[in-house]
Image (cartoon, grey):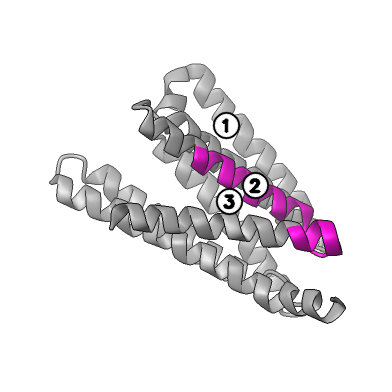
Amino acid sequence: MNELLIYSTYSVLLINLIVYSYSFFRKGKANVFFVSYLAFSFAMQFSMELCYHLGMTNLIFVNMFFIGQMILLGIFYNSLSQIKGQKIFIIISLTLALLVLTIQFCIDSGEFFKFNLFEITLTNVLTVIYALFHFYNMLTESKKYYYTTVGLVFYLLASTVLYLIGNFSLGLSSELKYLTWILNAFLILIYQFFILYDWKINFYKEVTIKN
């Protein structure tokens, strides 16, 4: 059951990468930063899975994923926004966040090889803020990447809560920690389905019509 859930997530992520790449390279419609985010996510998931099978710690890739996700989605939402104040906030907040994390890693380089709850919370909260900007903009603009943004906000908020619970439950039973891990994996799968549905709504019709 666990492997089915994990590999289902990988499969849907790979499908998303393929269809969005097709829409970008063949039709020039998909956002290049979002396609880059999907490619980065797949590379990180593959690296984490490889480390697991080799019996190595994959926490360095976990930390790289959260930082990379914040950067790529921040640039993605910055490219979608037409409001100068939002674009300035995204650039400044990204720069400050990276500066704070760099200082943390310089003070204690070992944090990059640990489950860094501060990093996860900081990067997730900022990414949610960027997504909420897009929600606001969609009140008067086209609803491109609407379902992706819905899935992202739901996933990041819920997973952040799960990470906090997991951190506070370190002294509790392994069953509870296992449950939080399963729920997080399920949230990722749901998020990937939101992305796929967004492609179907916004890009699939354009592909079929032009073909």
* Residue 130 to residue 203: above or below: above
> Is residue 14 visible from the viewing direction of this image?
yes
Q: Residue at x 57, y 46 (%)?
A: 42
Q: Nearer the viewer, residue 10 or 166?
A: 10
Give the CA separation, mark 3 to mark 2: 21 Å
* Residue 15 to residue 126: above or below: below
> Looking at the picture, which amino acid does disc 1 mark?
Val
* Residue highlighted by disc 2: 39
Residue 187 relative to residue 84: left or right? left
Residue 57 relative to residue 9: left or right? left
* Residue 159 to residue 110: above or below: below
In the picture as drawn, the residue positioned furthest to the front comes out as 211
Question: Mark 1 vs mark 3: which is more N-terminal?
Answer: 1
Question: Image quadrant of residue 97?
Answer: top right
* Residue highlighted by disc 1: 100
Badge 2: residue crowd in 10 Å (few <14, some 14–19, many ≥20): some
Q: Residue at x 55, y 56 (%)?
A: 13
User: CB of mark 3 within 8 Å of CB of mark 2?
Assistant: no
Q: Residue at x 53, y 18 (%)?
A: 106
Magenta-colored span: 22-46
Q: Which quadrant does the N terminus fall into? A: bottom left
x, y percent for residue 76: 72, 54
* Residue highlighted by disc 3: 126
The secondary element bearing badge 3 is classed as helix
